[in-house]
Image (cartoon, coloured by chain):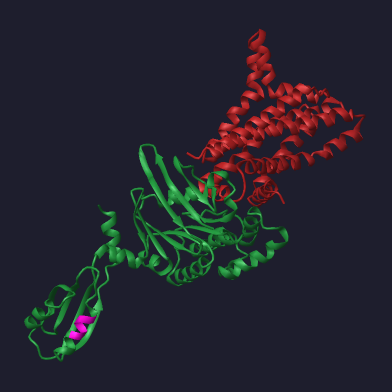
């Protein structure tokens, strides 16, 4: 068994043992379920057999919930000192970071898997564009990977979970919509650059069913950069 | 596997925590690291484990630098405050510790069983670590350090929080393990070093101030042998004192108690006065009732070395 997977497994167990994973799952399904099926502009109101509402709500729910999953990952280990024990074991900093990334990603993937009944229900109700829904899920997974990476970086900076949570939200909010807003307020090359940095813009473009290599490269870059910075913070041992 | 420490230094800001320390530890040696709080013991140990970076110098473990990360698998480490995942059950944690140290999957149950037995965790093995008393947590800490059968053991205050019986057990355990392995342990408890360690390193303000066995440190500290003797027989205390002072090997003598004829005798440097005192008693038809070599306490050596 590789060290990355051993760490991921321990992290998953810790999340389920401490109930955080269950709380996140229940809240995520509650929020997305309510707005998709019962909230004012739900599927029945729109009379369209698609999951556009679900994807829009999930995008925001994940934005808030992912920092809650990632905040403890390094901060808690730093606070209790277990990080010292972990890093003096026969593992590299990279394996530790990847293990924690994998664990968080699996929790999100489990949450999304529980929404597959939404997809099945909609496809019973009407004729759905299977491709668009598949792309929507792909978009959510990529967006989650990016926010997990940002959250892990934030958690690697501090020994305080709340600070890690707020920092992840603070960084995330730029990618989530501030870059969009700023792009709308400017023109020329700056607007282009800001637009290019917007997670929402890339997510929306994938969710429309068009996968551009630019979108994939963007998400990939954010993930790699966040994880490398987290790794750097672990290596930088004062 | 030997540890070779070559002139390591470490500063925190302006404060030098470790200042150009060099020493070597051979396989089968148990080295006790002694020093006041903040002397640099923990910092040195953290550098050996590779957790802290050094500012200068190098540490070689079996010829490989700890900077390479390749040495981690040979080390079992119990950090100062024994940090553990409190939400994990003991057995699950030990399995994790074994797996992450690269113990093959099919060998893990056996290793865990062995550690539970060796560290006396059988009664508590199904509890989560957070539910355990401090002494049992310390045992779990020791178990996780030992689980992959490491060549080198670094134990930072291994007996804190244990009751006297547990302390004896853990000491015996360390002694036993130390026969084939290289052990460095730090402690504040002086009798502990004497009981467990082959060699003592006293460190103060980031420098090594003494290095040797407990006995060699003693002779170093006092310079010459001191005997306390009590004799029985008919002799004036002052006459006896004069007579003792004339012996070849005696440098100085004094009366401790004239009633019971107790004396303190300082031997000349590099000699012992035992034999000549015995012969003097025989020649004067006296009975040598007591002869006790006076030992400088390790506490005093420690105090002298670290207070200046």
The magenta segment is B275-279
Could you say where residue A60 lies in the image, as x and y percent from the top left? 69, 30
User: Is residue A159 at least partly visible in the picture?
Assistant: yes
Could you say where residue B89 lies in the image, as x and y percent from the top left? 62, 59
Q: From the viewer's perspective, is B173 left or right of B109?
A: left
Is B29 rendered above or below residue B293? above
Query: Nearest the camera: A46 or A138?
Result: A138
User: Is residue B160 at least partly visible in the picture?
Assistant: no
Q: Residue B277 magenta-drawn?
A: yes
Q: Residue at x 63, y 32 (%)?
A: A226
**To which quarter of the image does residue B192 belong?**
bottom left
**To which quarter of the image does residue B283 belong?**
bottom left
- The chain that appears green in the image is B
**To which quarter of the image does residue A193 belong?**
top right
Is A174 rendered above or below residue B208? above
Q: Residue at x 58, y 49 (%)?
A: A86
Could you say where residue A8 lies in the image, as x and y percent from the top left? 68, 47
Majority secondary structure of magenta residues: helix
Number of on-image labels: 0
Q: Residue A202 magenta-drawn?
A: no
Is B76 rendered above or below residue B53? below
Q: Residue at x 30, y 66 (%)?
A: B218
Query: Nearest the camera: B191 or B290?
Result: B290
Per the rendering, the colour in which chain A appears is red
Q: From the viewer's perspective, is B306 left or right of A28?
A: left
């Amino acid at each position: 068994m590789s060290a990355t997977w051993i760490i991921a497994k321990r992290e998953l167990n810790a999340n389920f043992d401490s109930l955080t994973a269950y709380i996140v799952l229940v809240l995520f399904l509650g929020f997305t379920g309510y707005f998709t099926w019962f909230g004012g502009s739900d599927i029945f109101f729109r009379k369209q057999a698609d999951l556009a509402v679900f994807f829009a709500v999930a995008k925001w729910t994940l934005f808030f919930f992912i920092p809650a999953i990632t905040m403890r990952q390094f901060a808690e280990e730093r606070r209790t000192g277990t990080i010292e024990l972990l890093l003096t074991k026969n593992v590299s900093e990279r394996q530790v970071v990847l293990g924690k990334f994998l664990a968080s990603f699996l929790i999100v993937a489990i949450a999304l898997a529980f929404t597959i009944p939404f997809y099945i229900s909609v496809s019973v109700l009407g004729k759905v564009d299977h491709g668009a829904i598949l792309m929507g899920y792909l978009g959510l997974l990529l967006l989650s990977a990016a926010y997990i990476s940002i959250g892990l970086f934030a958690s690697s900076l501090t020994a305080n979970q709340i600070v890690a949570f707020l920092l992840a939200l603070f960084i995330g909010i730029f990618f989530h919509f501030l870059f969009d807003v700023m792009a709308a307020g400017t023109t020329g090359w700056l607007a282009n650059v800001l637009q290019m940095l917007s997670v929402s813009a890339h997510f929306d473009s994938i969710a429309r069913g068009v996968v551009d290599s630019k979108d994939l490269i963007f998400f990939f870059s954010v993930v790699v950069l966040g994880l490398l910075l987290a790794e750097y913070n672990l290596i930088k041992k004062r | 596997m030997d540890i070779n420490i070559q002139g390591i230094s470490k500063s925190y800001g302006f404060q030098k925590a470790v200042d150009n320390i060099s020493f070597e530890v051979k396989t089968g040696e148990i080295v006790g690291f002694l020093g006041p709080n903040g002397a640099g013991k923990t910092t040195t140990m953290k550098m050996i484990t590779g957790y802290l970076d050094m500012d200068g110098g190098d540490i070689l473990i079996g010829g490989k630098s700890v900077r390479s990360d390749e040495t981690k698998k040979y080390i079992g480490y119990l950090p100062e405050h024994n940090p553990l995942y409190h939400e994990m059950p003991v057995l699950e944690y030990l399995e994790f510790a074994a797996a992450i140290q690269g113990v093959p999957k099919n060998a893990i149950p056996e290793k865990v069983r062995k550690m539970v037995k060796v560290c006396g965790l059988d009664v508590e093995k199904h509890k989560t670590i957070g539910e355990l008393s401090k002494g049992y947590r310390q045992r779990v800490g020791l178990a996780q350090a030992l689980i992959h059968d490491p060549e080198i053991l670094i134990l930072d205050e291994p007996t804190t929080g244990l009751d006297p019986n547990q302390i004896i057990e853990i000491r015996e355990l360390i002694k036993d393990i130390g026969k084939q392995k290289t052990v460095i342990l730090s402690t504040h408890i002086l009798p502990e070093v004497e009981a467990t360690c082959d060699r003592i390193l006293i460190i103060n303000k980031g420098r090594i101030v003494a290095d040797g066995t407990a006995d060699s440190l003693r002779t170093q500290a006092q310079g010459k042998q001191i005997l306390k003797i009590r004799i029985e027989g008919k002799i004036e205390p002052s006459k006896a004192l004069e007579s003792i002072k004339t012996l070849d090997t005696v440098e100085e003598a004094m009366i401790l108690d004239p009633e019971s004829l107790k004396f303190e005798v300082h031997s000349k440097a590099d000699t012992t006065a035992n034999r000549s005192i015995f012969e003097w008693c025989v020649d004067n038809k006296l009975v040598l009732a007591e002869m006790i070599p006076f030992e400088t306490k390790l506490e005093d050596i420690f105090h002298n070395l670290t207070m200046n």
